Image: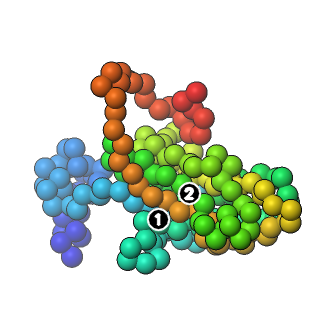
Amino acid sequence: MDNIVSLVICVGLAGGFGVFCEAVCSFCYWFIPKRTRGFEVVSTYDEVEVSLPKRQTANSAGYDICILDGDMIVPGETKVFSTGLKAYMGTDEFLGIHIRSSIGIKRKLILSNITGIIDSDYYNNPDNEGHIMIALTNIGNESQIILGGERIAQGIFYKYLKADNDKATSVRTGGIGSTL
């Protein structure tokens, strides 16, 4: 209820809505809960049933990520799957994407890039809004059917450190592969 009251007052004070006016409206800055890290649905998938990642047990490190549409992957083939998800996090964090152990061990499927790295500035980029895609490669001898809604990967949030002489100043202007 407090968030609803804050949002109504915010509209009157700054003309914005919640998180959009945090920099302008001191009321919202102090009273609307701050987000530190998490997952959202990409806007082009608003009308699709997208499962937000969740941990399966209290001590799980990874948030299980489901794919939207299934397909078959023949031996030696790589396919890219949509999740409909994007992730937000602190500027000193990244989201590591890892294959679920049962998928790798039992079904001989691996992430094509072995470990995915989702940088904090990938979120809401102008190319694809930060859409997390999962590329799988079948290294086995049998075709594998991946079902829509299946938990394929895990996302783990990590902090990282910068070297003393780090001078990176570029700003991301696109999606996958834009920082070449």
- Circle 1 sits on which residue? 62
Q: Amino acid at mark 2?
A: His
Q: Could you tell which of marks 2 and 1 lies nearer the N-terminus?
A: 1
- Mark 1: give few (<14), some (14-19) or many (20+) Cα within 10 Å: many
Q: Which mark is residue 54?
A: none
Q: Secondary structure at mark 1?
A: loop
Query: Toward the viewer: 92 or 88?
Result: 92
- Circle 2 sits on which residue? 98
Instruction: Left or right? Give the position of 165 relative to 130.
Output: left
Q: Residue at x 42, y 65 (%)?
A: 61
Q: Residue at x 58, y 27 (%)?
A: 180
Q: Amino acid at mark 1?
A: Gly
User: Dots 2 and 1: beta carbons under 8 Å?
Assistant: yes
Q: Is residue 174 above or below residue 111?
A: above
**What colour scheme has been applied to the protein in the rendered image?**
rainbow
- Mark 2: give few (<14), some (14-19) or many (20+) Cα within 10 Å: many
Q: Is residue 49 above or below residue 138?
A: below
Q: Quadrant of residue 92?
A: top left
Q: Residue at x 68, y 56 (%)?
A: 110
